Amino acid sequence: MTFLPIRARPIGDGRAICISDGGSFFAGSGEFMGRLADERLSPADLDFLSREGHAVEDGDDLAAAAHAYAVAERLTRAGPLDYLILVPTLRCNLSCSYCQVSRAGVRQKGFDWDEGTLTAVLRRLDALPADRIKVEFQGGEPTLRPDLIRAVIERSERFRERQFVICTNLHELSPEILDLFDRPDLFISTSLDGDAETHGRNRTGGEGPTSQFLANLDAVIARYGPGKVSALPTVDPSTPPDVDALIDSYAGRGLNSIFLRPINFQGFARKRHSASREQSAAWREYHERFVRCLIERNWEDRSRFIEESYFSICLRRVFQPGRDRYVDLRNPNPMGVDYIVVDYDGTVYPTDEARMLSRSGVIDLSIGDVETGWETEQRELLNKAATNQFDPACQRCAYQPFCGRDLVDDIARYGRIDLPRHETEFCRRHLHMFDLVFRLVYEDDPAVRYSLSRWLRLPGTPVALGVTH
Amino acid sequence: MAISLRLAVDPARSSTAADAVQWVRAFHPDVSIVLDGDDAVLGSSMHGEVDLRLVWQTALINESLLAHGADARAAILEELVR
């Protein structure tokens, strides 16, 4: 008997994509799909499926082992804790309308790490078994407490590989902050919502602060080069900016990655942007237009390439198994294992979004605290459902090997984790993303192949990125 | 313009077809589908006939291969987590 571990989905050009559980794929012609549906495959079909690793014959141990290996490659194996998101302060010097964490006012007391929390964080760093570490400083505005950032960085010198990211609004650039930024292992992440008017409307609230931010952004890019600085736009899907203008605001500064992010249904946005619970078809059309505009621009000017970061993440999930460190898109998605979030009061959360939900008073998703630990019943409970493997909808979805499970997103939007998957925004968003990936993979256009190859970091551009049968 | 497509269902596979109908509705909200006797009737104002046929075929394929491969898939996962 032949085991065909594949699932199929139309890709809109008279063909359907067939994807094996291990993630290898081919486009099936209408005729082939008809034969497969009618269970009357030809010897040539069976030969193709077997040759390409999409069929496993009974007793063929080598094919079975190869298939099992491919499936294993698609499953996340979380290593030891080596990624910490630290929130040394919840205070912020801006008040964005869609602030995800409901930040505290800049002069409020009791929203910074106290001495005990700092000591506990440093002790945890000392105890980490890994020889590499990534620390992301979030907030509030973490640069309000450069002393705490410095204490963590100095304590992390023992790690062979280390990377620090400060997520900052770049509102203030003091000599002390610049001294931190000067470290070669430190990267700067900020928000740039588009042109000055859009950014001012969404975030800085006036011409003066907006000019100050843009001057600071340009100053750090001039000082360090664009490779050290990343920025991402938060877009209000009800009034998205002009695609070219948004790209220009990044490209003009030498920033080549744009993580197109609709308002997150978290924090203040839950009330002020309640429509952000679900993304509309109009948003998805905007996203596709954005990606296609990048393809066109990359083809016209091949001296550089620009990417939409999340599309690239999804694309690499298809072609490069083991890309599991983007923790919102992996399967299983174990929580509180290889990364954690430590809040301003020492509370430990499994994700930054879990912190946001707790801060908004929606649900307490904390899994412990930095002093006493987070190997708790709460963590265990969350991890019982942290896979897409056994979900009825995911079992029928061709994209399951590439997709993930984000319990916290479901809780944020619906207050539950047992909604049928296809009724969730997570599912709809990723169906759109992977549909777009495969439509582009099979589009017979050198400009498309050129961009896809750059986004995959391939040295050249193949004549085709996918097999057809 | 709305397109409608009537496709014959093998009576021996009526149970698979009934399940497939459910998942067409789930994954393709822009497609209407009902079982009418031994036929599946699909409709859409967004998709042409070729697309509709593929929507139905892929749903049937997924149901059928899911049922046939359930034991093999379970065995592989069990082996991997052991």
Image (cartoon, grey):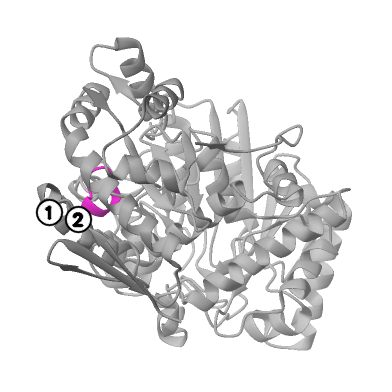
Point 33% across, 60% down: residue: A408
The residue that mark 2 highlights is: B9
Please say if A358 is above or below A327: below
Q: Is residue A328 magenta?
A: no
Q: Secondary structure at mark 1?
A: helix
- Looking at the rendered structure, the kind of residue marked 1 is Ser
- For disc 1, the marked residue is B14
For the residue carrying disc 1, how many other residues have a C-alpha within 10 Å: few (<14), some (14-19), or many (20+)? Answer: some
Q: Earlier in the sequence, mark 2 or mark 1?
A: 2
Chain bearing tag 2 is: B
The residue that appears at 56% across and 78% down in the rendered structure is: A107
Residue A74 picture location, percent across and down: 41, 34
Depth check: give the residue in front, A289 or A387.
A289
Q: Position of residue A363 (x, y in %)?
A: 26, 68
Single out the mark in the foreground, 2 or 1: 2
Q: Is residue A388 visible?
A: no
Disc 2, SS: loop
Tell me if label 2 and label 1 are in contact, CB under 8 Å: yes
**B31 lies above or below A85:** below
Residue A318 coordinates in the image, percent (x, y): 51, 41
- Determine the residue positioned at 24% across, 39% down: B65
* Relative side of A394 to B19, left or right: right
User: In the rendered structure, does residue A393 fall within the stretch colored magenta?
Assistant: yes
Q: Amino acid at mark 2?
A: Val
Q: Nearer the viewer, residue A335 or A107?
A: A335
In the image, the segment drawn in magenta is A388-394
